[in-house]
Image: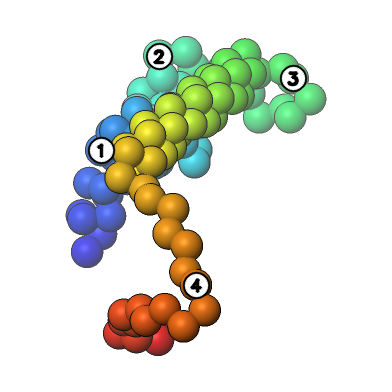
Amino acid sequence: MELVEFCYNNSKHSAIRSTPFQMVTGKSLIVPMIWAAHGQPPNDASEEVPMVTRLDEESRHLWELAKANLEKVHERYKDFADKFRQEVKFQKGDEVWLNIKNF
């Protein structure tokens, strides 16, 4: 089951155009390789870490991009649903068919 979760969290989704893992954490799984290329972050928390600042900016950009993509998808779904939507008015005494399967 762990492999299924790993695959799901690391596959790009069409709506957000990113992986769920990347949306939540703001980084992909290759971050340790980036640390190796740029050196480990300093142990002193008072020092500014450019890599952390960059990751923060990237994650904010990803959230904005995902929000924009989700709004586009929502609008596309709404347009599709509105094509077939009909306003139905009922009068007192009209007979209707009720499906109580999910109640």
Verify CB contact (< 8 Å) between mark 1 and mark 4: no
Count of numbered labels shown in the rendering: 4
In the image, residue 37 sits, relative to residue 8, either above or below, namely above
Instruction: Give the residue at mark 3.
Output: 47
Circle 4 or circle 2, nearest the eye: 4
Instruction: Give the residue at mark 4.
Output: 91
Ranked by sequence position, the earlier of labels 3 and 4 is: 3
Three-letter code for the amino acid on which mark 2 is drawn: Ala
In the image, residue 103 sits, relative to residue 59, either above or below, namely below
* Cα gap from disc 3 to disc 4, whole angstroms: 72 Å
Ranked by sequence position, the earlier of labels 2 and 1 is: 1
User: Mark 2: few, some, or many residues within 10 Å (few <14, many ≥20)?
Assistant: few
Ranked by sequence position, the earlier of labels 1 and 4 is: 1
* Percent x, y of residue 67: 52, 31
Ranked by sequence position, the earlier of labels 4 and 2 is: 2
User: Which residue appears at 22% of the width and 46% of the height?
Assistant: 7
Q: Nearer the viewer, residue 73 or 97?
A: 97
Q: Is residue 22 visible?
A: no
Instruction: Give the residue at mark 1.
Output: 11
Quarter of the figure with residue 46: top right
Instruction: Give the residue at mark 2.
Output: 37
Q: Is residue 10 left or right of residue 24?
A: left
Q: Is residue 95 visible?
A: yes
| Quadrant of the frame with the N terminus | bottom left
* Cα gap from disc 3 to disc 2, whole angstroms: 19 Å
Three-letter code for the amino acid on which mark 1 is drawn: Ser
Three-letter code for the amino acid on which mark 3 is drawn: Glu
User: Mark 3: few, some, or many residues within 10 Å (few <14, many ≥20)?
Assistant: few
Dot 2: what SS? helix
